[in-house]
Image (tube, coloured by chain):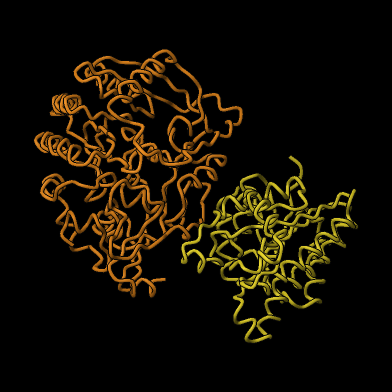
Chain colours: A orange, B yellow
Amino acid sequence: MSRQLQDTGPAIPIGMGRSYGDACLNPGGTLLDTRRLDRFHSFDPEMGRLVCEAGVQLREIQRAMIPRGWSLPVIPGTQIVSVGGAIANDVHGKNHHRVGSFGHHVRNLRLLRTDGQIVECSPGVRPDLFAATVGGIGLTGLIAVAELQLQPVTGPWLDTEILPYRTLDEFLTLADDSEPLWEHTVSWLDCTSGRRTRGIFLRANPAVEQSGKPPVPRRRAVPFTPPLSLFNQLSLPVFNTLYYHLNSYRGGTRRRPFETFLFPLDDVQDWNRLYGPRGFYQYQLVVPRDAGPAALREILDIIAKSGQGSFLAVIKTFGERASPGLLSFPMPGITLSLDFPNRGARTERLFVELDAVVRAAGGRLYLAKDARMPRDLFEASYPKASELERFRDPGMSSGMSRRLMGR
Amino acid sequence: MDKKKRIVVIGATSAIAEHCCRLWVRQGPVELILVARNVALAERIAADLQARGGDVGVSVETMDFLSTKAIADAVARWTAQAPVDVALIAHGVLSQQQPCQDNISRARESLEVNGVSPVLFAEAFAGAMERAGKGTLALIGSVAGDRGRRANYVYGASKALMDRYAQGMQHRFAGTGVKIVLIKPGPTDTPMTAPYKAQGRKLASVESVAEGTVNAIERGTPVAYLPRKWQLIMFVVRNLPNFIFNRLNI
């Protein structure tokens, strides 16, 4: 395989293609499809250590390992991503405050470089190359095999609680109070309501009572792309209001299977089609805790004034644990993830305004979601990016790397 | 639970067979005997299945797939150890039509590997299952066997042999505990069909075809088109009058 890599020219690995931007795109170049690298190599049931190929989907690991009492410690908002992608984007989950990001649980990596070399690295062996590869969006070589540390679980059920809130301060208090006691915390926010912030806080712990098999989720699909985005200025306030009241009404505690709690969108195939043929942008930012609340208020103001709302606005506090990768996204603070129907120049103008707030607050944007951040913002907000240069595989290049790093 | 399910897979490196095995491993305790020509690849598949499953036994064997003696001996040995619950016969090569026309020894190869060898395995298993009074014998055929087409009638004819053979066995075992299942996948996204994918053809996912295969084996469905739309498509293709069919470039 390493020989094949040598003849490809500027290439970038792709897994399930779930990045929202151009991290795994390579206009004019080659994509290295890793989906057939989908085999497990070995599992140590005593220590919970799994060695598998990079194209294995996280959902495959969960389905095989949860019945055996083990789980991936970190899963992002979808399970339909590959191990290689999860490492290369150093993804985080709703339990970041407890366990950090995906890269914290990688014990070893095997990299294929386009010069034919096969290199192993880990937190102990060639730690600098390891730090460049975790979160390195594929630029240090193709991740072929990884050893992952799993964590013990008792079963697939979670005890969940839903709490409505009416101000940003209320959210922050809920987050601070929940973190020591709850494994998963996340919150949905109505960003069409402007100053009168409101939202739904969700928290969950593994259920003590684990009896009963979880129901097989009903899979739905969006059958076609509507000619216009279903999320627009008229529908968004309605959707948001409905969502808020429905969940406030349903509030309280419930036992739910982890899949429906953690990955609500995984059962709606091709949900992105709802945004119509022009699609949408994701915008996920993190701001440090001190400057955070003020910056977030400003951001919500700007969005409300722009009239370009977001339906899937998700807000979460990150924990203190330092991220493992040079380009890792998480930092101690508050992260807000938004999606906006693509309305061309108007949407870009909104982003420029939001960028300014993020930059002033000392925050950054998530590479896995980004398709348009200007290079100077990247350089200012990812100060370790220059250290990545000497670990780059000269044969690897993506749309994103050319946009943000010049090559 | 009772004892482990015992499953023999002939052509275990077939992508559809491999994904069937992954589903069986997920379902519970199982003993898998993987039979393959490419042993190195089969060993990697065995390691994968072993790592996925808890109570899973996997062994790998290789043999001459065209030797009647090797087939008879191997099947006798597997079935003598304990009754085989499921035999999945999945091996094959997607032979190109033109080389088979240019060189009849290539045509012979294709007919033997895709047609003769699978039905000989099936016949050998059928005897043992008949004596045991139970067992499910599944063959992976193809929609290509439903009507000869200029694009691939050598491959199609070998699959048609399998089709008629399975039909006869279904007649033979009607009303008994032995089930004969013929799977007819449409074009599926596997390494075998990579050239078609490169042409931009839309292919069914191997996961969905494997899921349908495992379900058909579980239920003893006599003929399963996967994905199901191919049942309708092939009904039309089979019944097109020649004056239309002959003008189609399919």
Please tell me how many numbered marks the rendered image carries: 0
Which residue is the extreme one toward the front? Answer: B243
What is the quadrant of residue A337 in the picture? Answer: top left
Residue toward you, A106 or A80: A80
What is the quadrant of residue A79 in the picture? Answer: top left
The answer to whether residue A99 of the structure is visible from this angle is yes
- Which residue does the image show at 27% across and 20% down from the upper left? A171
Q: Is residue A199 left or right of residue A405?
A: right
- Which residue does the image show at 73% across and 60% down from the upper left? B139
Give the x, y percent position of residue A238.
Answer: 34, 20
Give the x, y percent position of residue A102.
Answer: 35, 45
Give the x, y percent position of residue A119.
Answer: 33, 66
Residue toward you, B38 or B220: B220
Q: Give the position of the C terminus of chain A as an image quadrant.
A: bottom left
Residue toward you, A340 or A298: A340
What is the quadrant of residue A125 in the picture? Answer: bottom left
- Which residue does the image show at 83% across and 66% down from the upper left? B123
Q: Tell me: residue A231, above or below residue B76.
A: above
The answer to whether residue A316 of the structure is visible from this angle is no
Q: Give the position of the N terminus of chain A as an image quadrant.
A: bottom left
Q: Is residue A383 left or right of residue B214?
A: left
Residue toward you, A92 or A234: A234
Which residue is the extreme one toward the top? Answer: A249
Give the x, y percent position of residue B89.
Answer: 72, 63
- Which residue does the image show at 70% across and 56% down from the upper left? B183
